[in-house]
Image (cartoon, rainbow, N blue to C red):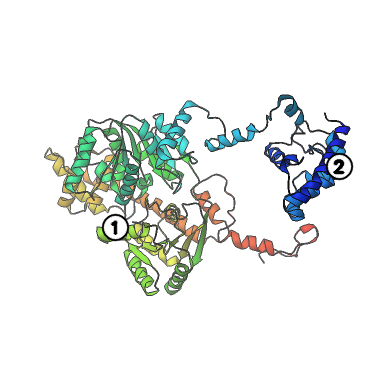
Amino acid sequence: MPSANGAAEGESLASENAGPARANGPVLAERPYGDRPRRRRRRRRTPHPPGNPDGGGDSPAERSPEPRDSDADSDDATHFGGPAAQDDDPGPWDSDAAESGSEAAFDETPMNEAPLEQNGSEPWRDRPRRRRRRRRGGGGGPVPDERLRQMLDLLRREFGLRHFRPGQEEVIRAVLDGRDALAVMPTGGGKSLTYQLPSLVLPGLTVVVSPLIALIRDQFEKLRAQGIETVRVDSSLTGTEKEEALALLEEGSQKIVLITPEGATGAAFKKRIADQKVSLLVIDEAHCVSEWGHDFRPSYLALGALAEDLGRPTVLALTATAPPLVREEIVKRLGLRDPAIVVRPVARPNLRFEVKQCMTEDVKRRELVQYLRRLRRPGIVYCSTVKDVEELGALCKIARIPAEIYHGRLTKAERDHAHKRFMSSGKRIVMIATSAFGLGVDKPDIRYVLHYQVPGSLEAYVQEAGRAGRDGLPARCILLWDPRDIDVQRHFLSEGPTTRSQIKKVVEGLSAWTKDGRGVEAATLAMATEVGVTRTKAILEGLRDADLVSETDGQFSLSREIDVNEAVKLLSRRNEERKTTDRRRLESIIHYANNTEECRMMHIRRYFEDGEPTPCGHCDICEPKLRRRRRRPKGRGGRPMDSGRDDDE
């Protein structure tokens, strides 16, 4: 340890060198304090002050490695900007050293100086660097097992990502272990990666069933851009293109096939891949198995049987919103075996939920125009009917608001043009659409989603609202609430999937074909009974669910002789049970819109039984409460004064 004499010599040397530096400019090689900034930075990197192994603060003397005399201080100020520069960066130890005195500070050498003199090394310098390298590695610590190391390596090499999002690792582990899985992850939560990464590891083909052609096309383009061998089979392809895609599947050179539920359950597709090993069956938007409204997709009910036809591969069901009852129905209808169920919070914290009361149609349209003029674009406005979409599109033209419309009655070219214009990064427009638009729309910078009318359930609302703010920046989810809008949804529910007379026609027609010893395709049966293809398929799936119908190569027949009236009663009773469930789901969105006390985010999370929710602090319910709290007068000690009355009075 240096002595006091050494300190005195240091002081005299500092005073001798101070003079020439002020007269002739800085002589950095001779300045005794020239290394201080580097030493100061080294100490800031240490996890604890080096003088105290327990993590506490050092004494002023322990934090001062060298004496600080007045001449050296003034010289430091002269060459690095004067007194102002000294005040800008005083350092945590400067004031302490001044208080303790230079000699005392020099005598009390810090504990970390001894290794420096003895070994000539600085053992603490490498520790922060190693810690930072671990952070960049994506794990925040050592990799726990070889499987995770392989997954992270593949994630970086093929997808350019450094770590998994919450929930992705659990789902991918289950799939690679050959276990069925149900993943409920919010929009933008990275559901696609949970099958894309395993498809590169598993030996066979991955079949991905998606409900919308736009979603299939978007995923196809992204996978091909990443160099993953992928084909798509949907109705937008020409006959030649579809035949080429199926031929590629037969060759066995493809890793992923993207297909609609109608195509996947068709006899032609099953026949063409009969010789291929299917390792994974992915059901995207799996909540559609419980959607029995006007846009019901009966082919989703046949996907459980599809898994058996493909040799029963691992099944992965993906959805953005599914409360507990819907999750149970997904597991049952898809025939998942002991599935790993991964559920993430349905609503992201960057979304601001709000409800605007509008008692008349004129008030609602004025509010809509004000929102569209004030809010930052791009945004989406959802309507329940085609008529409202077209009327609001015309209103936007009058108000000179750049907008496109999208609904199922437009031609394919019109829908593609509207979709392409909205997705263009250089365009900031408003999309006015029915629920036909949105599934799989991967546009991260949507700043708001506004519902002009209520959808059929709270889960449908949350899924559509979740398309805003996928980039993590603040976004708004607004509902214009008029109680009379419920009549539209009640009308959709009254239609139901099928009626008693339609059930009777289909069962009688199927019975006649079976007596002749023949099977019949769903389209042929629909044409013969004049019921319609969608409703005919719904009735056939209901009969198959009751073990009354069998299917062979797309041909349906009764599995046993049944009484027509008994079959009608059975399916009618199931339809009534479904309508009761749908009415309860409609009540959930009504309760949400009428709520004026509970935080919107808490209300949503309670409905989905999503942990123990806490107030979000920024919805239209929470913000006024926080504002009132801030306005309360403060008493002594900063505590709010007791006004003698309740805040809500």
Position of the C terminus by quadrant: bottom right
What residue is rendered at 80% in x and 43% in y?
Answer: 17
Check disc 1 and report the residue beneath it.
416
x then y, percent, for residue 459: 44, 52
x then y, percent, for residue 212: 31, 50
Q: Residues within 10 Å of mark 2 (few under 14, many from 20)?
A: some
- Left or right: residue 101 versus residue 302 is right
Q: Residues within 10 Å of mark 1 (few under 14, many from 20)?
A: some
Please tell me whether mark 1 or mark 2 is closer to you in this view: 2
Residue 239 vertical placement versus 314 (above, below):
below
- Left or right: residue 193 versus residue 52 is left
What residue is rendered at 43% in x and 47% in y?
Answer: 320
Residue 82 vertical placement versus 254 (above, below):
below
- Left or right: residue 75 versus residue 218 is right
Check disc 2 and report the residue beneath it.
100
x then y, percent, for residue 344: 49, 43
